[in-house]
Image: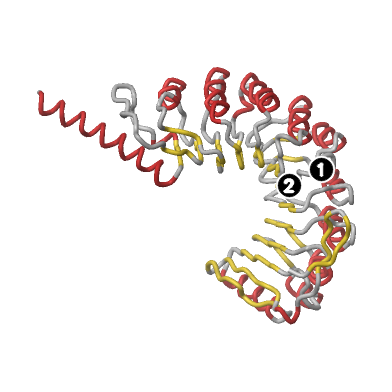
Amino acid sequence: MQPSLVKINNSTEKKINAWIHGINKTGYLRSSAIPDLTKNLPAQKDQSIWVEAIDLNEQLSEDKLKQIVRLKFLKLDKNIAIIDFNQQNFDSSFIKTLLDWIESEKPDIRQINLAKLAHCSKSWRYFIDWVIRTKCVIKSIDLGETAMNLSRTKDIITLIQDSAIQVSRIDFGSSLWKFSEMKAFLWMGGLSSSQQLTRLALGDSKICPDSIRLLIDHLCTQASHIQVFSSGVVELGNGELTKLSEHLMSRQSNIISCVLSNQVFDQDRSLLLAKVVSRSESMRHLALINCWIDHKKFESSLVSGRVENIYLETITAGQIHHMTDCFTQKGYHVDQKISRHRVRLKLRGDNHQPIKKKQGAEAYVSS
């Protein structure tokens, strides 16, 4: 029995050492990779092992989380790239243990994905109150599966408007919005009350048509501070695409980067898209991902390029060749061929025109 017991102990120790080595090499702490620590806690290390990202990609028990916290050599980096709640089902006790650990290290967090956090109302409340109390810096918030209500809408507005928290990006994730919540979000200054919030992504959120219309109306005003907008896979109607395109061509637009995914551009909207590429004074980056475009109308309407950087992604290789040829004939060159279906294009130097950039006083800058 003794040799077998030694073999088991050695095997467990190897798994623990491999886990520690993995964190030390990548900075990633994934819940699915955590070994059994109940019987064999690793010995304290001479050097600290720094955690730069946390991914709860598998349900983690509070007991195992406490075991991790007790490993004094395992420390949170001062700048955490991402904390992804991912597959974790929360209760108020687990979120308290996790946030106590984070508070003890006081890191800045570049991005946090809330995932299923809001499925537990007490966990949501504890998290929001904790962020407000500690003023933890969180640059980007992904709302995950949050079913919005008026109280949660006010919570998000509070985080956005607190300059100490420094939220610069909101991703709606797969959140659910009714018209009343969207109206409250926008009327409380969701896109205009904080100069720090400059990036908005709609993700694959569930938003009713009236809410989308109201959101685009507020986005397309000079009061909006959004500089980077992504439609996600949320379908914009003809009215919204028209409003957005006209805004991108106007001198009042603050948007310098726009990502449009899975959108349908009919003849009229394809004409407007071509005008955006040819005329926009503020845009530096435009991405078209799996969009349906009337190619004949777009090609005949595209006079020349003004948007410096174009990213194209299509379902078929034939489509990417067609679109690439169209842009290269109008002053662009292929900057990077990422794959058969993805390509980056850049405006050739002799075609580049100065772009108007708004940051306080208006100024003309050439990238």
Specify the quadrant that holds the C terminus: bottom right
Q: CA distance from mark 1 to mark 2?
A: 9 Å
**Residue at figure coordinates x 77%, y 53% from the top left:** 227
- Name the secondary structure under disc 1: loop
Q: Nearer the viewer, residue 69 or 244?
A: 69
* Label 1 Cα neighbours within 10 Å, binned few <14 / some 14-19 / many ≥20: many
Question: Residue 303: where, in percent of width, then height?
Answer: 81, 78
Q: Nearer the viewer, residue 231 or 364?
A: 364
Residue 22 in percent (x, y) is at 37, 43
Q: Please state which of residues 336 and 225 is positioned toward the viewer in this rendering.
A: 225
Q: Is residue 168 visible?
A: yes
Disc 1 marks a residue whose amino acid type is Leu
Which residue is the site of mark 1?
191
Rendered image quadrant of residue 19: top left
Picture disc at residue 200:
2
Q: Position of residue 262 (x, y in %)?
A: 68, 56
Residue 268, visible in the rendered structure: no
